[in-house]
Amino acid sequence: MTDRILYQFPISHYCEKTRWQLDHKGLDYQIRNLLPGPHRLRTRLMARIDTLPILRDDRRTVGDSTKIAYYLEKYYPQRSLLPAAPDQRARVIELEQQFDRLGVDVRRWLYGQIIDRPEVMQAMLNPYGLPGVVQSVLTPLTREGVRRLYRIEPKAVMRSEQRLEEGLQLLEQILAKGKGDYLVGDQLTLADVAAASLLAPLLSPAGTPWDIIDENSHPPALQVQLQKLRERPAGQWVMARYAGDR
């Protein structure tokens, strides 16, 4: 049994970023799903943070998906996601940071559209196998906690939509200038993993935690918006990375 444990929320795209890297490197790990809200008691004790993912690797504990990424590159360099060439390496680090920040706006905008859908709270709470009466009590509490924590409010959601469009345009500009499937060089890097995983909730690739809602039941305007995203180069690239590299 491995001593490597990933503490996570299954539905978190930041946790998906770490899962992708671990899987890419072929590292064995166990999953521990922490209940939203009470998770803070554990995360503060383990890593002095309020967020997930947290990776416990034998006696080492690392919190935050970006810190985990560079920890894994340092201690498990096989199938590296950082190029050896200094200029490419610097570019990957720059893009990883940009798309990592964009993940906040992806989350806020998407929750702004679907936070009241029952499937969203089911996806958050079903993995824990809670008794029905407990889950029914926690559902509204969790929804309001998410709303407050991620600032799911009209003005903030609108700003996140603007930043999201800027991020999609950045991705498409990089792709237009490139010569292949990847953002830097000719193989998968941490920049690709960050961009694809943090945008994935908008595309709901099959088999991911976000493949939970029948989009035909969305309001017509949102259906159109998501379909346009799928058809544009950024959306097609995310789906291609999931199909080819995940």
Image (tube, rainbow, N blue to C red):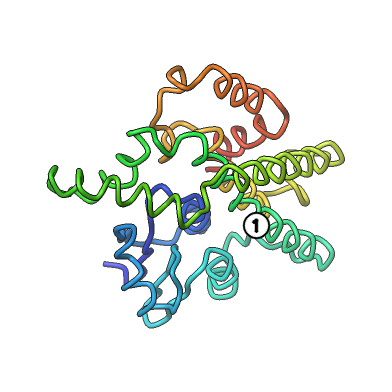
From what the image shows, is residue 190 above or below residue 127?
A: below
Label 1, secondary structure: give it. helix
From what the image shows, is residue 209 above or below residue 104?
A: above
Identify the residue at horizontal 60%, vertical 70% (top origin). Answer: 70
User: 155 or 150: which is nearer to us?
Assistant: 155
Quadrant of the image occupied by residue 41: bottom left
Identify the residue at horizontal 73%, vertical 56% (top origin). Answer: 95
Q: Amino acid at mark 1?
A: Arg
Q: Where residue 184 appears, x then y in whole percent? A: 77, 51
Identify the residue at horizontal 53%, vertical 68% (top origin). Answer: 68
From what the image shows, is residue 119 above or below residue 40?
A: above
Residue under pointer 1: 101
Mark 1: few/some/many CA within 10 Å (<14, 14-19, 20+) = some
Q: Where residue 50 appears, x then y in whole percent? A: 43, 69
10 relative position to 101: left or right? left
91 relative position to 1: left or right? right
User: Going by the picture, which residue comes out furthest to the bottom?
Assistant: 59
User: 18 or 182: which is nearer to us?
Assistant: 18
22 relative position to 8: left or right? right
Q: Where residue 9 appears, x then y in whole percent? A: 38, 55
